[in-house]
Amino acid sequence: MSILRLSTRPVAIGARFLGGIRPDLGWYPERSETRRCLSMDSSVAGLWGSLSNSTPVAYCQQALVDLHDLSGLPWWASIILSTVLVRTVVTMPLAIYQNKIVARLEKISLEMPEIVKQLKMETAVAMKKFHWSEKEARIMYNHSLKKQWNNLVVRENCHPAKTMILLWGQIPLWVMMSVSIRNMVHMLPDPSSIEAQITFTELTLGGFGWIPNLTEVDQSLILPVAMGLINLTIIEIQNLVRTREPSRLQKIFTNMFRGLSVLMIPVAATVPSSLCLYWVTSSACGLGQNLLLMSPRFKRLVGVPQVPSEIARPYQHIKATFSTRIDGLLAKVGLGPK
């Protein structure tokens, strides 16, 4: 199939009707739409169409096809391999960098108590010397405190906004990969392209096990449920390794992500299995990435500085905390040990 695709690439673009002339029907007048549809469906379709035809998605889609042709693997293995490569080459370095930023922020926060103490003394002296009011002293104190914090941030190059760098890189990449796989299933952006038709045919034959056709949904629901369980596991693990009591906002976000993970199961049950396979593989890679970045040995290996909040034995801590919570839950329902 790959040889056929390569031989047909020069005619990848389908027949175009120029000057309003169609070979099969002869001349016909070009229509001009005068109505503007302002419905929500048309807006969403227009946005989705723009994304589907965007340049980044085109490059991503072509990269998937090239990897499949070069590796000679069936499409299910090509999707898994491409996902693992992307998560390793792109998101893993971003995750390591984000961990470095978080560690640096924690380290400079340890310097703040001494700075606060010194600023309070200087402010008290300045109030007597310059006859400041309480309001003036508070303004100058807050200004000096913010300046000292900014100096520490600049010194360590750890702006708090950089703690979101993983999301900035991971979400657009996830969207591009998802749209690229959807394009291949629906033979977009040009259904008349021979290359698109070949790729679609290969996807119908490139499945595995209980999913021989990757263009159809997973009727068994194994992949959608697996994705939901993996995402819930990631959330619970992140919750278990917290050394401090979560704030009210953190609890809200945790519950929100739990709900989103469950909500994604019926969504995944309606998409082609090739797309669901990508989502499951991406979530599994995310779980492995989170577990790996908990290891103190790996953190030192990649240059993440040690901080007081770091857990010396994270995996044992997760196991012990999980067992304690399960025992507490069983005790509440009257199933605990007597």
Image (cartoon, helix red, strand yellow):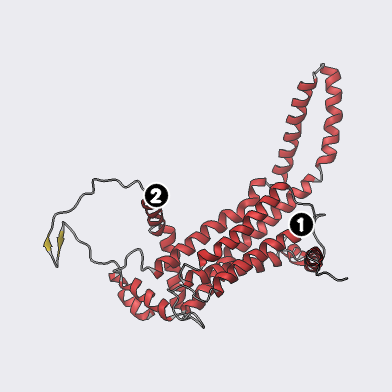
Is residue 55 shown to the viewer in this render? yes
Instruction: Tell which circle, 2 or 1, labels the residue nearer the N-terminal end.
Output: 2
**SS category of the residue bearing label 2:** helix
- Mark 2 is surrounded, within 10 Å at the Cα level, by few (under 14), some (14 to 19) or many (20 or more) other residues, namely few
Q: Residue furthest right?
A: 338
Q: Which residue is mark 2?
A: 40
**SS category of the residue bearing label 1:** loop
The picture quadrant where one finds residue 135 is top right
The residue under label 1 is which amino acid type?
Arg
Q: Quadrant of the C terminus?
A: bottom right
27 horizontally vs 293: left or right? left
Residue 11 percent coordinates (x, y): 28, 70
Residue beneath the point at 84% across and 30% down:
120
159 horizontally vs 338: left or right? left
The residues tagged by marks 2 and 1 sit, at their Cα atoms, a distance apart of 42 Å
Q: Quadrant of the N terminus?
A: bottom left
The residue under label 2 is which amino acid type?
Met
Decide which of 54, 49 is in the foreground and name it: 49
Which numbered marker is on residue 242? 1
Residue 189 percent coordinates (x, y): 35, 63
